[in-house]
Amino acid sequence: MKVLLTGATGLIGHELGLELVRRGHEVCVVSRRKEAAQDVPYPCRVLQGDLSKGPLPSGMLTDIEGVIHLMGESVASGRWTAERRRRILDSRVLSTRHLIQSLESAPLKVFVSASAVGYYGDRGDETLTEDSKPGSDFLSEVCQAWEREVFSLKDRGPQVRVAAVRLGIVLSAFGGALTKMLTPFRLGLGGPFGKGDQWMSWIHLRDAVGIFTRVLEDASLDGVVNGVAPEPVTNREFSRELGACFGKGLAPAVPSAALKLGFGEMSEALLGSQRVMPTVMQKAGYRFEYPNLKSALAEATSLYADGDMILRSQQYFDVPPEKIFPFFAEAQNLERITPPLLGFHIEKMSTPEIEEGSLIDYRLKIHGVPVKWRTRIEEWVPGKRFVDTQLKGPYKKWHHTHNFEKLGRGTLMTDLVRYRVPLGWAGWFASGWMVEKDVNQIFDYRRQYCARHFSEKNQG
């Protein structure tokens, strides 16, 4: 199926696009920038346009059969001023309206949109299903207006299947609400919000992707679908379980008055209670990968359990793995993909070529300070993966996994780095932010270099 995906670079869109390609769909994404293809880690056609301002140019979507619409401004990125409230609403309502207008000549079969459990408002201990009535607060009104636009598409007739997935809090190791909570809970300073008796409806990212994919492909599913796990928990239970992932107990609760003072009206999202059940997906026989909070948090926090900092970088190249891996098998190319400012240079290797067990000695400069670094290649699987770890160097820990996956006719390259600065939490507070910035800049340079190099290689 030819599928249009909006919000493709967001938390869900990133993983969902990968899953759609793996399942054989052709993916198109909408972006204000044509260069956005470099930010999307899967093969896709990039359609340039701004749905917040108007429909896409006529004829651009004439081959689209399915749509997954995830576009919408974050509700948790600042206080809800009058201007932010307007942007939160318009980014959902107007983008949906303009998208539907853009699809007038498309052979559309299915349109799936995101929504949120905020639709239900603050409902205390009430168990909520897809048939429950809406609330009356700001987020509920936004969701209602959003869904009205979505279901207006039904006016085109029964040939188009329309669904709205009301998402709970999405749990992932690589972004979203959970990663913003990690630091206080890793330090043992995390506690519940207010009384902590408000219900939280959550879902692991893998199941969010699974539900969107199932709704797209299953002709029996339409209307409203709750995108939540089958075991909602109270905020106190969530906080206790998250602290336990790091061997910590609960800190004192954050008073409701303090939340309202600090966040204003946005505190409603923290203190509101929605005990939502995924009735439609359960009746459809969907099997959750992470049905309970303990397993979901264990997976989402496992990379952080030892106090590590994490970087994940994913990049797609329209070149097969067998033509990419040899580039990384040449030790000297590591110098080329490192910013010149670091003065990175390989001094010696213990083997003529890189292989499992190879020791590589480098020198470089960090903020002008000369540093020596020794790496060991822990794993070497040509064409697929290799792992290097620091034996001596500036970090307390540096463990870097390079993975190469055949995706479509090209390659998904994933770098996963687990690193730790010296002196524990004291070192983290003193320099962690600066180290994180440096590491991100190094990998940004690496991405840009590889994008140019493999683009030229593909054209050649």
Image (cartoon, rainbow, N blue to C red):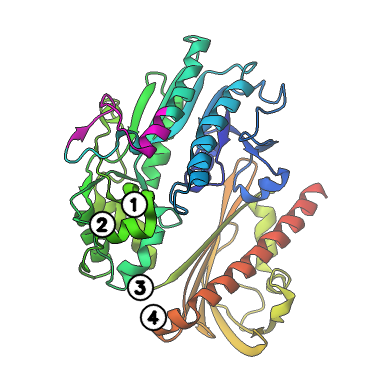
Of residues 246 and 132, the one nearer the viewer is: 132
Image check: 100 left or right of 148? right
What amino acid is found at the position of numbered circle 3 in the picture? Asp
Secondary structure under tag 2 reads: helix
**What's under tag 1, amino acid-wise?**
Ser
Whole-Å distance between the Cαs marked 1 and 4? 29 Å
Please identify, in this view, whether the residue under mark 2 or under mark 3 is nearer the observer.
2
Q: Secondary structure at mark 3?
A: loop
Mark 3: few/some/many CA within 10 Å (<14, 14-19, 20+) = few
Per the image, the residue denoted by label 1 is: 267
Q: CA distance from mark 2 to mark 1?
A: 8 Å
Nearest-to-viewer mark from 4 and 3: 4
The residue at which mark 3 appears reads as: 306
Q: Circle 4 — which element?
A: helix
Question: Where 77 falls versus 304 (above or below)?
Answer: above
Percent position (x, y) of residue 399?
49, 72
Q: Is residue 298 above or below residue 375?
A: above
Is disc 4 surrounded by few (<14), some (14 to 19) or many (20+) residues within 10 Å? some
Residue nearest the viewer, comparing 248 with 56: 56
Mark sitting earlier along the chain (2/3): 2
Q: Is residue 42 left or right of residue 347?
A: left
Q: Return the residue at label 4.
A: 425
Residue 294 part of the magenta segment: no
| Residue lying at 21% horizontally and 61% vertically, measured from the top left | 240
Amino acid type indicated by mark 2 = Ser
In the rendered view, tell whether residue 72 sits above or below residue 284.
Answer: below
Membership of 127 in magenta stretch: yes
